[in-house]
Amino acid sequence: MGLDLYKLPITPFLHTAHTWSQVAAYFDAIGKWGVTLFVEIGVDKGGLAAFMWARQTFHPEFNYLGVELHTHVVDPRLNACVLYGDAFSDHIIDVVRSAVNKSSGPCLLLCDNGNKPRELATYAPIIRSGDIVAVHDYGVEIHQKDLGPVLSWEFVGYLEADLPMWKKP
């Protein structure tokens, strides 16, 4: 009866590049803004994806879509929620655009791949009014000068010092 919790792809040994407080901050933002779609550009090994997949399992109104270039780095248990390919290819951009447009509520798009300024420039135009964009590693891999697409948007705060977010008007 019900969901077999032992089959969820969450273990204490699943790698995440995010701190536990960052993971908690994402969930706080999802709840605060009623996010129904979380798009992660740059999944890496899939630690954050596993948490989002679990949320999707327990909250049917919530969806997660991860994008990752390297198939060999992501835990294979997460293949159902990760789209593999170049985040800058027309195909991947179209799939993300379609998912955003089909979302019944706000989308939170996280730029966390290897070229965050280009990710922001590529994906900021795709999200809708009321959607949110966040960038990981602010001040290290992306800087104030790279924020052109979102500078006129409402700054909604930092999830943590290196995780600023903006809401599209």
Image: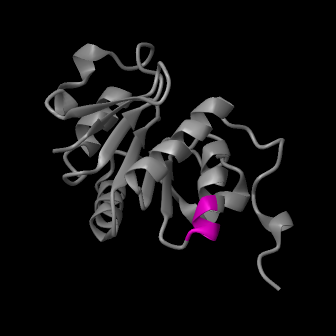
Q: Is residue 17 above or below residue 91?
A: above
Q: Nearer the viewer, residue 19 or 112?
A: 19
Q: Quadrant of residue 164?
A: top left
Q: Residue 167 location, x and y as percent? A: 26, 41
Q: Residue 155 location, x and y as percent? A: 26, 30
Q: Nearer the viewer, residue 128 or 29?
A: 29
| Residue at horizontal 28 percent and vertical 60 percent from the top | 97
Q: Is residue 11 above or below residue 103?
A: above
Q: Is residue 4 magenta?
A: no
Q: Residue 21 location, x and y as percent? A: 63, 31
Q: Which residues are magenta?
A: 55-59
- Where's the C terminus, which quadrant? top left
Q: Is residue 7 above or below residue 41?
A: below
Main secondary structure found in the magenta portion: helix
Q: Residue furthest front?
A: 32
- Say left or right for 76 vs 29: right
| Total numbered labels placed on residues in the image | 0
Q: Is residue 131 visible?
A: yes
| Residue at horizontal 29 percent and vertical 35 percent from the top | 166
| Residue at horizontal 77 percent and vertical 43 percent from the top | 14
- Say left or right for 11 vs 41: right
